[in-house]
Amino acid sequence: MTWTAAVTRLRARREPGVLVTVATVRGHAPRRAGAKLVVGSTETWGSIGGGNIEAVAIDRARELIGKPDAEPELMDFALNDKVAGRYGVQCCGGAVSVFLEPLPVVPAVAVFGIGHVGFELARILARHDIDLHLTDSRADMIAAERLAPLAADAVARVTVHHTPLLPEEVLEELAPGTHVLIMTHDHAEDAALCDAALRTPALGSIGLIGSSAKWTRFRRRLADEGRHDAAAIDRIRTPIGLPEITGKEPATIALSVAADLLLTFQGEDRQGA
């Protein structure tokens, strides 16, 4: 497997890793500069030459995987018989520098409803390195031509879902930790999504757009017949966004919601989520 495919696999699995690259080579060494190794928690792909260099780099990479604030770093190795490494001697005669680059788990967000606010929010979120799911029951809201401005300079990995019948089924496809934002055009659809989100294990935050009157009705409905207890219902955050930003224009609401999400991402980074 190529190193690029290995990085893609880790991202798809939402697993952290480290990309290890031979940065410089002086004299003789097992691999040339640019050789790469991808290290996951339990697997590796590729090689930077084997022996002590590779084994020590893998050990250090796995230490970095366990650190929530890990930074890229360089490791230097002298390859001669006067240097006893942790895993033996490599006496090629040269010297090697190895660069370790942490590959954190990127945030994931699912936006349900790509209307005026959802579209503006998607435009902002698409400019960040996240996994972004855009879902709508209306085909025209997620048509390729409508999303073209968003896709033109997207950094995010964007997945589009058209769900004309049961939008809540998308929740079952989301990776653990995905943050969910519910803002469809239909209050009945919103209510069904809230109910389904509370029954979907391992999601991240759940946000609902709307007024206090809307939430009062939803809370009563979610509690009816004992479907969800109060603690579960309290997982749904509404209103969404930063309370200090009070404008009602779609772009303003989207900016507020995006800023609040970025603060959530920062909190997860500090906790090693």
Image (spheres, rainbow, N blue to C red):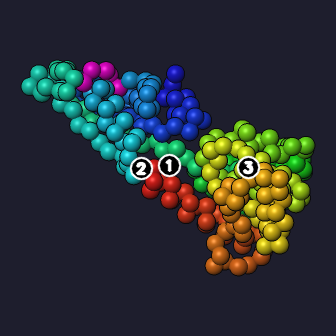
Could you tell me the amino acid type at mark 2?
Pro
Is 31 situated above or below 204? above
Q: Is residue 51 magenta?
A: yes
- Label 2 neighbour load within 10 Å: few <14, some 14-19, many 20+: some
Say which label, 2 or 3, has the lower sequence index: 2
Q: Is residue 94 magenta?
A: no
* Quarter where residue 182 is shown: bottom right
Could you tell me the amino acid type at mark 3?
Ala
Could you tell me the amino acid type at mark 1?
Ala
Nearer to me, 93 or 19: 19
The residue that label 1 is drawn on is 273
Say which label, 1 or 2, has the lower sequence index: 2
Residue 112 visible in the current orientation = no
Query: Residue at image x 35%, y 26%?
Result: 48
Residue 24 picture location, percent across and down: 29, 35
For the magenta stretch, what is the residue range? 48-52
The residue that label 3 is drawn on is 197
Q: Is residue 27 left or right of residue 231?
A: left
Query: Mark 1 touching mark 2, by CB under 8 A?
Result: yes
Residue 184 picture location, percent across and down: 83, 57
Q: Which mark is residue 68?
A: 2
CA distance separating discs 3 and 1: 20 Å
